[in-house]
């Protein structure tokens, strides 16, 4: 039994949602250039990349290769580059090798398990700094956020417009969330009917996939994101990519590397 057979159960309004998603993407790719898709290579992001390809929309795709990804994720990255790299730019951003090595030397390979401060500092080096590079010069970015994923994402809008009060940083750019109202069943139905490649870990009960040390399989009845940073409490379960500056600073100073 694979993820498609388990989850591909579309909602009654799937066709309307798909049409709306296409319209959101088309509008964003016309109005908010230059634009890029942030792909974690999770199932939602694979749907979006396929839609950009199918609708022939002008958007780059980028992946953060943190140096801690699963072998299955790296294999999918190669597939994405081969499948979609002919009609759009697929960029890969990596952390500064020296900064990553220095962090491990000072704190150990298992630093993320020692404290939230160290885990977020690791995310900062491996994700946040490369993300800033990926978004440099961009007016907007496209994500796979869905309201169903967690309480923290329950208020996600289709398009979070650019904040005119901020001149730099992620918060100054528009964020496009074209799958905001999709259910898990909708996502997997799209994967199934369009034969979209997806991460093999999804077939091993990994609904949400990040770095290997920080991701585990979930069991029946567990929350969608319970396999991410499972040793932390629910309120801390974001790496910082989708937390605004004010919220992030109220949780932890993520650039404090021991």
Image (cartoon, rainbow, N blue to C red):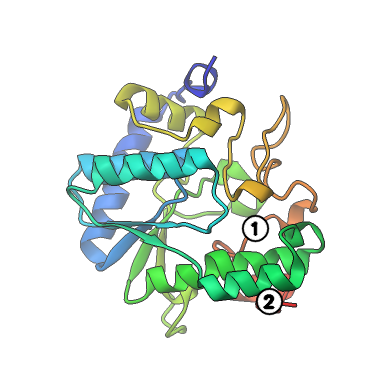
Q: Can residue 126 be seen in this view?
A: yes
Tell me: 221 left or right of 167: right
Dot 2: what SS?
helix
Tell me: 15 left or right of 3: left
Categorize mark 2 by other alpha carbons within 10 Å: few (<14), some (14-19), many (20+): few
Dot 1: what SS?
loop
- For the point 75% across and 62% down, the residue is 111
The numbered disc on residue 238 is: 1
- For the point 29% across and 37% down, the residue is 19
Where in the figure is residue 219, as x and y percent of width and height?
A: 72, 28
Above or below for 171 versus 167: above
The numbered disc on residue 130 is: none
The reply to whether dot 2 and dot 1 touch (C-beta < 8 Å) is no
Mark 2 or 1, nearer chain start: 1
Where in the figure is residue 13, as x and y percent of width and height?
A: 41, 28
Which is nearer the eye, 53 or 209?
209
Q: How far apart are marks 2 and 1 (CA)?
A: 13 Å
Where in the figure is residue 231, as x and y percent of width and height?
A: 80, 49
Report the residue marked by disc 2.
Answer: 249
Which is nearer the eye, 177 or 3?
3
- For the point 33% across and 39% down, the residue is 79
Q: Is residue 162 visible?
A: no
- For the point 41% across and 25% down, the residue is 189
């Amino acid at each position: 039994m694979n993820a498609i057979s388990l989850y591909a159960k579309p909602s009654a309004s799937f066709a309307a949602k798909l049409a709306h998603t296409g319209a959101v993407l088309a509008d964003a790719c016309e109005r908010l250039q230059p634009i890029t898709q942030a792909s974690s290579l999770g199932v939602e992001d694979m749907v979006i990349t396929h839609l950009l390809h199918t609708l022939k929309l002008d958007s780059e795709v980028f992946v953060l290769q943190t140096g801690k990804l699963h072998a299955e994720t790296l294999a999918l990255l190669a597939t994405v580059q081969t499948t979609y790299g002919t009609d759009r730019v697929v960029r890969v951003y990596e952390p500064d090798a020296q900064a990553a090595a220095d962090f491990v030397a000072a704190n150990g390979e298992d630093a993320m398990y020692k404290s939230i401060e160290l885990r977020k500092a690791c995310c900062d080096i491996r994700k946040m700094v490369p993300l800033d590079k990926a978004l440099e010069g961009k007016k907007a970015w496209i994500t796979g956020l869905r309201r169903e994923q967690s309480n923290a994402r329950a208020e996600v809008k289709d398009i979070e417009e650019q904040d005119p009060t901020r001149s730099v940083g992620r918060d100054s750019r528009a964020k496009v969330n074209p799958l905001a109202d999709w259910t898990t069943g909708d996502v997997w139905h799209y994967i199934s009917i369009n034969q979209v490649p997806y991460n093999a870990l999804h077939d091993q009960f990994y609904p949400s996939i990040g770095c290997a040390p920080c991701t585990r399989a979930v069991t029946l009845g567990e929350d969608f994101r319970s396999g991410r940073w499972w040793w932390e409490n629910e309120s801390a379960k974001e790496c910082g990519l989708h937390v605004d500056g004010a919220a992030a600073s109220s949780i932890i100073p993520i650039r404090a590397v021991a």
